[in-house]
Image (cartoon, grey):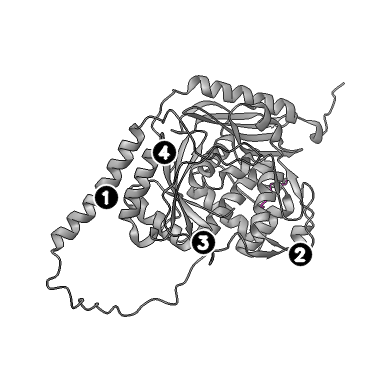
Amino acid sequence: MMVVIPLSAAAAPYAAMVIDARSGEVLHARNADTRLHPASLTKMMTLYIAFEAVRTGEISLDTKVKISQNAANEPPSKLGLRAGQRIAFRYLIRGAAVKSANDAATAIGEAISGSEAKFARRMNRTAKALGMSNTTFKNAHGLTESGHMSTARDMTTLGRHLLYDYPDYYNLFSRRSTDAGIKQVNNTNRKLLAAYRGADGIKTGYTRAAGFNLVASAERGNERVIATVFGGRSSASRNAKVAELLDLGFRRSPSNVALRKPSAPKYGANPQVAGKTIRVTTAVKTSLRPKMRPRSAEPQNQAVVVATAKTIEYDIQSALIEAQAEKPATSDTSITLTSTSQTIPTPEPQVVTRLSTSGGRSWGINVGRYPSRYAAEKVLLKTALAEMSTLDGSLRKVVKGSRGYEANFLGMTRETADLACRRLQARQIACYTLGPS
């Protein structure tokens, strides 16, 4: 007699993908292009767009979002948001990233696009721009819906973009727990984070139709691997499989590979972010030529100006090269900041310029990680001299981390930090902003 297995009890199809995150090279693939239910891996795209919207000024982390009845009615997992409640956008991001809260994800979509349907269209435009050719989104949270499908390859691609496009937000995915505004929430991926050495993200997912899904990333030394699994039979077996795939990735990936970050999303002819048009209404119609200062006898030779600019830029690049060649100092008296109480050694003197903590000056920029404190301070000084117009008044600070010395400028407004980074990146100098969160 034939036994009919109910759909809810049948195992979801299995798919897997492993890549070297530094180069994007595929190290293992199985059913990687089979369209399957992504479940809460969907929230990776929701969060990608949330980070994008904050960066472009569509919304801020401190914006108070009013929760709709639609968002409040989402089934678990959820934060327990109430209709009409107002909550800071940053807490919705934390709830979606760490707890995988469906109500928080829906609220994010509605806050950015006005409705979940419009947000889903933006999700699909963004997926296309990132090269996720086999993905279709219908909602912001990932609960099963007809046509809401993705692949192991596409979700691996999205995970890599989250890592490299928004490194200043990536730490969210490694938090074992976090304050989500209305309560403290635990990470749905905390077991793998605790059990696998080097694991620091990214996102879990589960529905009956999908099975147990996970995109995970881990770093060991110079190597970083991303592994994706669709269709696990349980969270334990899924985690074990992901650990096996990460091990495979570390075995197959070379120790040293040139970092090739993924290309920025290509939204087509419209340079603005997909889904929103920004109109500038305060454009200057005329530009008056400034008068020469009386003390200046002759205008400066244009060739000298160009040569000086090129010299400053060359100095920065030279400092960067020298810094990378520096060996770590044998002794270290810097302060390492952690979330737990520790004995803090006496810090070395640090070069400090003017700093104001008022007026929203809680932003900063990072211009790289270096093997010694001297190297980091040298780059900070050279960069400050080259970008005096945007970095004047900021705090130059070197912070010792587990993998080297971070070179930071702090005490900036968000606008100034964004402008400074854009100007430095235009000179091919690595830079990313440091937000208040």
The CA distance from mark 4 to mark 2 is 47 Å
Alpha carbon distance from label 1 to label 3 = 27 Å
Q: Neighbour class for label 1 at 10 Å: few (<14), some, many (≥20)? A: many
What is the magenta range? 139-143
Kindly indicate the quadrant of the structure image that contains residue 186. top right
Gap between marks 1 and 2 measured at Cα: 50 Å
Q: Residue 427 carries which label?
A: none
Query: Disc number at residue 85?
Result: 2
Regarding residue 73, the answer to whether it shows in the image is yes
Residue at mark 4: 373
- Classify 10 Å Cα crowding around label 2: few (below 14), some (14-19), many (20 and above): few
Give the residue displayed 45% in from the left and 58% down from the top: 417
Q: Name the residue under label 3.
A: 361
Amino acid beneath label 4: Arg
In the image, residue 141 lies in the stretch drawn in magenta: yes
Give the mark, 3 or 2, whose residue is nearer the N terminus: 2
Q: Which amino acid does label 3 sit on?
A: Arg
Residue 230 rendering spot, x and y as whole percentages = 65, 33
**Mark 1: amino acid:** Glu
Q: Residue at x 60, y 50 (%)?
A: 47
Q: Is mark 2 on a helix, strand or loop?
A: loop
